[in-house]
Amino acid sequence: MSSTALAIDPTGPRPIRRFAPSRIFIYAVLIISAIYFLIPLYIMISTSLKGLEEVRLGNIFSLPMHITFDAWDKAWNKACTGLECLGMHTNFWNSVKITVPSVIVSIAIGAVNGYALANWRFKGSEFFFIILLVGSFVPYQVMIYPLVLLTSKMGIYSTLWAVIMIHSIFGMPVLTLLFRNYFASLPAELFKAARVDGAGFWGVFFKIMLPMSLPIFTVALILQVTGIWNDFLFGVIFAGPTNYPMTVKLNNIVNSIQGVREYNVNMAATILTGLVPLTIYFVSGRLFVRGIAAGAVKG
């Protein structure tokens, strides 16, 4: 009886249909979405590798017949804005000088704030946290004029210091929220055990919290580098002409109305401007996902 039943009723998981309608639909949506997002990148890369005569033929979807890197060389070294033909390399280093200290300062402040609000709660800490959150939702445009007056009074207007200070301040609320939620998701027993062993504020932070926080630091790093590197508004207002970041220089090159409009140079300049955030995304993408999954956006 039992052998007959086993022969009639198969066991184990049900076989998966390779061409089920739901699977075909999912793959179709994914493929269409990928093509939609990759077409602009394909056009930019292929156009940047063409000579200007080939670009003038007007077929933006065709592959380059003769690959040349002249447009990339001109965008980096000789692209003109007005009477100045210095390319984008000087503005690349301006962006580096703005991004590196801004990212370090804002992440350091956000990490300490989040750690204190999650593990060392004091009277009024929740109110302080709410104030920070409300501050993060105030539009930038509302604060521009007061910030211009403030930086002028401080004597740093039209310098790199003004942009660094503003990026550090504006990044602090969101980073505080991220780090607070992450530290709150860690087991409280770790903090209590460290306290029993005599560790103080900085001892717990450096010896317990920091070694466990690589995913959230990666998330914060990606968010800040992307936001600060791609910033245009603060750069054009507060940096001054000699300190313009790459985004401002790109705008000046693309919108230059003098001479022939060189689309291949514009495309190369655009890719050069976005190369740093893209590289960070590709290198640290897995850690970014781990940080998000580990509690970066919980709370």
Image (tube, rainbow, N blue to C red):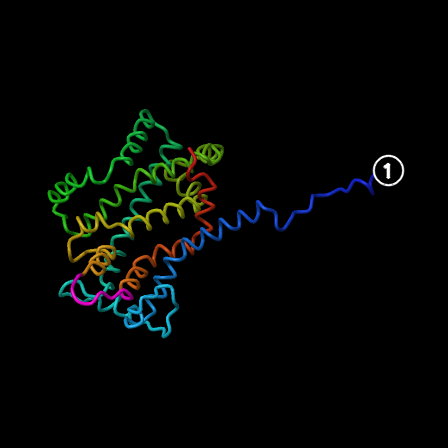
> Residue shown at 44%/42% (left/top)?
292
Above/below status of 228 relative to 54: above
Give the residue type that dot 1 points to. Ser
Q: Residues within 10 Å of mark 1 (few under 14, many from 20)?
A: few
Per the rendered image, the range of residues in magenta is: 257-265
Above/below status of 191 relative to 161: above
Please name the predominant secondary structure of the magenta segment in the image: loop
Residue 68 among those drawn in magenta: no
Point out residue 205 in the picture as x, y percentages from the top left corner.
39, 40
> Residue shown at 49%/33% (left/top)?
189
Total number of numbered discs in the rendering: 1
Point out residue 244 in the picture as x, y percentages from the top left corner.
20, 56
Above/below status of 176 relative to 267: above
Front residue (pair 203, 72): 72
> Residue shown at 43%/53% (left/top)?
284
Which quarter shows the C terminus? Answer: top left
Occupied quadrant, residue 247: bottom left
Q: Which residue is mark 1?
A: 2
